Image (cartoon, helix red, strand yellow):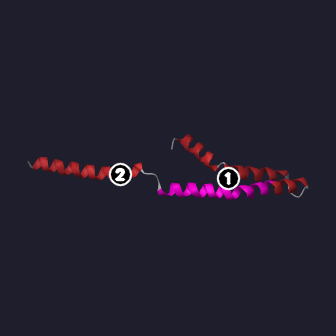
Amino acid sequence: MKRQRTARQTSGVVAGTLVPVGVALAQASPFEAGTTAFQASFLTMLTPVAVIAVMVLGVAALFSRISWSWVVAGIAGIALVFGAPQVVDWVRGLFGV
């Protein structure tokens, strides 16, 4: 009789500790929604700035005020900023995360 009660108590404790872990792992991170919204807003605000920056870099290089390598580096940086979600997804897929 005492063994059955101990077994029931043990199984109750194990079930009680494992259920919250399963529920916690099933939920998404609370920061994920906020970072996704921030990223979308940031890229929306940054789009006109990036267009103007490319135009200014091109005009400055056209009039030999800066080197064309600076223009290429600026465009590459802008491409990395706007392509960050795809780069992150690619790296996550690469490492299986």
Q: Which residue is drawn at 57% across and 56% down?
A: 37
Q: Residue 21 — which label?
A: 2
- 1 is within the stretch colored magenta: no
Residue 3 rendering spot, x and y as whole percentages: 12, 47
Is disc 2 surrounded by few (<14), some (14 to 19) or many (20+) residues within 10 Å?
few
Q: Residue 16 — which label?
A: none
Q: Residue at x 74, y 55 (%)?
A: 50
Q: Amino acid under label 1? A: Val
Q: Residue 81 — which label?
A: 1
Q: SS class of the residue under badge 2?
A: helix
Tell me: 54 left or right of 38: right
- 43 is within the stretch colored magenta: yes
Residue 16 rendering spot, x and y as whole percentages: 27, 52
Q: What segment is highlighted magenta in the picture?
A: 30-54
Q: Residue at x 72, y 52 (%)?
A: 78
Magenta stretch: helix, strand or loop mostly: helix
Residue 32 rendering spot, x and y as whole percentages: 51, 54
Asked if the residue at tag 2 contacts the one at tag 1, i.e. Cβ–Cβ closer than 8 Å, the answer is: no
Q: Nearer the viewer, residue 91 or 24?
A: 24
Q: Amino acid under label 2? A: Val
Question: What separation in Å lies between label 1 and label 2 (alpha carbons)?
Answer: 36 Å
Residue 44 position (above or below residue 96): below
Q: Nearer the viewer, residue 51 or 73?
A: 51
Q: Which residue is drawn at 36% across and 50% down?
A: 23
Q: Which of 6 and 26 is in front in this view?
A: 26
